[in-house]
Image (cartoon, rainbow, N blue to C red):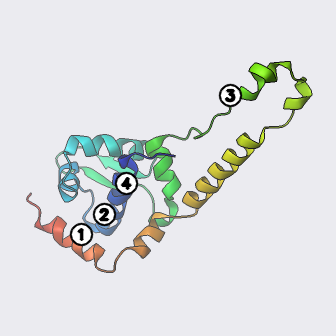
Amino acid sequence: MLMGEGVEWGLHCCMALAWLEDLAPISTARLAEMFELPPEYLKKRLQPLVREGILESAPGARGGYRLGRAPERITVMDVVGAVEGRTEAFRCTEIRRRGAGALAAKSEFAEPCGITTALRRAELAWRRELAGQTLADLIAGAPANAPVRARRFYEGLAG
């Protein structure tokens, strides 16, 4: 499955928001500046996270973003699903029933074919792996100085 960069931006922003939680809400402009992104671009990438309750958004001059729930309750799959959607990567169209398969007895198609079974099994394993990793796990695996570096950079930003 191909994931867009919105997943990466979403996860990095969630980590930064966790590290800066005591300063929240963090404005779109300052969060975008931390990652050298245009604010409108980042805002569009974060909107699905707000809709899913992963982030909270406060409007106004003193508004911005904060985590919508504790890092232990946000999985990587939550972010992937919010950004990329929750549709299955593989959709069986029963191509085996076309051409020569059209002549086969219906009983031959009672069970899913091996291709469908293999691809669905692989996707399920992928989803389970992402659902088993939380934002807290990513934070714990980050370099020890990452939170301090993020805070210093944030505090050095204008305005």
| SS of the residue under disc 2 | helix
Q: Residues within 10 Å of mark 1 (few under 14, many from 20)?
A: some
Front label number (3 vs 1): 3
Q: Secondary structure at mark 3?
A: loop
Q: The residue under label 2 is which amino acid type?
A: Ala
Quadrant of the snapshot with the C terminus = bottom left
Residue that appears at 68% across and 28% down: 93
Residue 119, horizontal then vertical, whole percent: 67, 45
Q: 155 or 104: nearer the eye? A: 104
Q: Which residue is mark 3?
A: 93
- From mark 3 to mark 1, how far is it between C-alphas? 47 Å
- What residue would you read off at disc 4? 8
Please give left or right for residue 133 compared with residue 32 in the image.
Answer: right
- Whichever of callouts 4 and 2 sits on the residue coming sooner in the sequence is 4
**Is there a contact, CB below 8 Å, between mark 3 and mark 2?**
no
- Nearer-the-camera pick, 145 or 154: 145
Distance (Cα) linking label 3 and label 2: 42 Å
